[in-house]
Amino acid sequence: MSIAYLDTSAALKLVVEESESAALARYLTERSELALVASWLLYTEMHCAAARRPGLLSVETVREVLDQVEFVDISRKDLIDAASLAPLRSNNALHLSVALRLEVNEFITYDRELIDAAERLGMRAVSPAGSG
């Protein structure tokens, strides 16, 4: 079984139709051996996004996506390690710090800054794209 960390930029594509949404959904469907993990930060970010955009994001759809993810707690060490990942934004640094701790096989994100940082640290960053 492979483990993939799902960040917010990717999870949002599963609830809002964007150009990469179909490719990401297809990628996840075709990789049935892939276990999705994330820190509880993803849970918070997704519910906050749904509350800010009630006409665009359905809380039920957010729940359906989040039900596919195994959540892990953010530790004090994750917070300390995230601080060393500057100049990333704090939320991105936390996502990456947790993914590093979990030693995931891949990091699913569409955030260019996060892709670059993950790859610099030797992590495989994945951003499925396609014609939809």
Image (cartoon, rainbow, N blue to C red):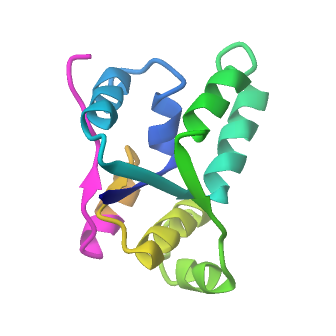
State whether residue 46 appears in this view. yes
Q: Which residue does the image show at 73% across and 38% down from the upper left?
A: 47
Q: Which residue does the image show at 75% across and 19% down from the upper left?
A: 54
Of the pair 123 and 31, the residue shown nearer to us: 31
State whether residue 87 appears in this view. no
Rendered position, 78 above or below 69: below
Residue 87 location (% of width, % of height): 48, 71
Residue farthest top in this picture:
55
Of the pair 17 and 6, the residue shown nearer to us: 6
Residue 85 location (% of width, % of height): 47, 77
Residue 91 colored magenta?
no
Quarter holding the C terminus is top left
Quarter holding the N terminus is bottom left
Residue 130 location (% of width, % of height): 21, 25
Q: Which residue does the image show at 26% across and 37% down from the upper left?
A: 128
Rendered position, 53 above or below 43: above
Q: On the rendered structure, is 100 left or right of 121?
A: right
Q: In this picture, which residue range is highlighted in magenta?
A: 117-132
Residue 124 colored magenta?
yes
Q: On the rendered structure, is 59 left or right of 110?
A: right
Prevailing secondary structure of the magenta residues: loop
Q: On the rendered structure, is 78 left or right of 85?
A: right
Rendered position, 26 above or below 126: above
Rendered position, 88 above or below 38: below
